[in-house]
Amino acid sequence: MNFFRNLFGKKENKPVIDNAVTAPLTDVQLQSIKALAQNRYEPIQLLVASGQSVGRQRELNEDSLFTCSSIIAGNSSNPPFGLFIVADGMGGHQNGEVASNTTIRTISGYIMKKFYNSLFGMTGQPVDESLQEIVQAAVMEAQRSVLRDAPGSGTTVTAALVVGQQLTIAHVGDSRAYLLYNEQRMEAITRDHSLVRRLEELGQITAAEAAVHPQRNVLYRAIGQGESLEPDVVTTPFPIGGYLLICSDGLWGLVPDDELRRIVYGAPNIQRACQEMVAAANAAGGPDNITVILVQLLG
């Protein structure tokens, strides 16, 4: 009874003694705090957001995406790890959605198995192969899976592996990856495997002509198309504070690069930026599926 009496019984009002003294921060202190908050993050980390829409003129979504990131911080820590994939099933081919989904599952499963012990094992043993070898082998495994499980279909794929500040990308088709730098500069780091892009590179058509060319969606390289495949594999530093943008042509084909850049830097956060980019593509007519992944490296 004493327990409940003490718990629910009337208590004496005792004065609260508080010796704490507060004072407003000076302008110098506020500026110092702001500078620290803007320029330093511990641990180094990846912020990730994504957006997707079937568009306004399609009934089926043939795009697929995958995002995964991890941080292990403490006395024994690993660099930030991230894997981000966009695949765009080829319209007009049977089972395009099967090809894109098979591709992201195959690539993500292959790479995550390679890094499982390094990320989550007690010894933290590094992987044996180079990052370039791993992502290329993962894409080739996806090629075999699509040929086996969805013959006659096809898909693009852009897969980005982030380990620390190192960014490695494997790319097939015309989905794109961009880097956005702190000075608000935006640069495409993948090259479209399309007929129109090839004609533009050869100087036979201009960029303006390529944008409206009737064969701008024709690819000469894609997952599931032909027995042989040569994915592009590139490695580049991920700029601290910068962004990685991966998207299908349902976004970049309708929203100009300058507008994408404006949205990323003008949005209050990366989730809102993804929503606004998808909305911009739909506002432009939304003739295709739209997929976007936006990643920021803070450190």
Image (spheres, rainbow, N blue to C red):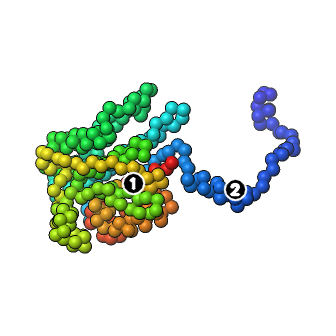
Residue closer to the observer: 248 or 15: 248
Q: Which residue is mark 1?
A: 244
Q: Which mark is residue 29?
A: 2
The residue located at (55%, 53%) in the rendering is 39
- Marks 2/1: CA–CA distance: 33 Å
- N-term mark: 2 or 1: 2
Q: Is residue 282 visible?
A: no
Give the numbered dot on residue 136.
none
Which residue type carries mark 2? Gln
- Near mark 1 (Cα within 10 A), the count class, few <14, some 14-19 or many ≥20, is many
Q: Position of residue 154 (x, y in %)?
A: 18, 51
Secondary structure of residue under mark 1: strand
The 10 Å Cα crowd at callout 2, few under 14, some 14 to 19, many 20 or more, is few
In the displayed structure, does residue 31 sit left or right of residue 10? left
The answer to whether any part of residue 190 appears in the image is yes
37 left or right of 212 in image: right
Q: Nearer the viewer, mark 2 or mark 1?
A: 2
Is 259 situated above or below 152?
below
For residue 33, above or below residue 113: below
| Residue 220 appears left or right of 158 | left
| Residue at 33 percent of width and 48 percent of height | 235
Of 24 and 153, the residue lying toward us: 24
**Residue type, label 1:** Leu
**Residue at image point 49% right, 35% down:** 77
In the rendered image, residue 209, in percent from the top left (x then y), is placed at 21, 73
Residue 69: x %, y % from top left: 42, 43
Specify the quadrant of the image occupied by residue 161: top left
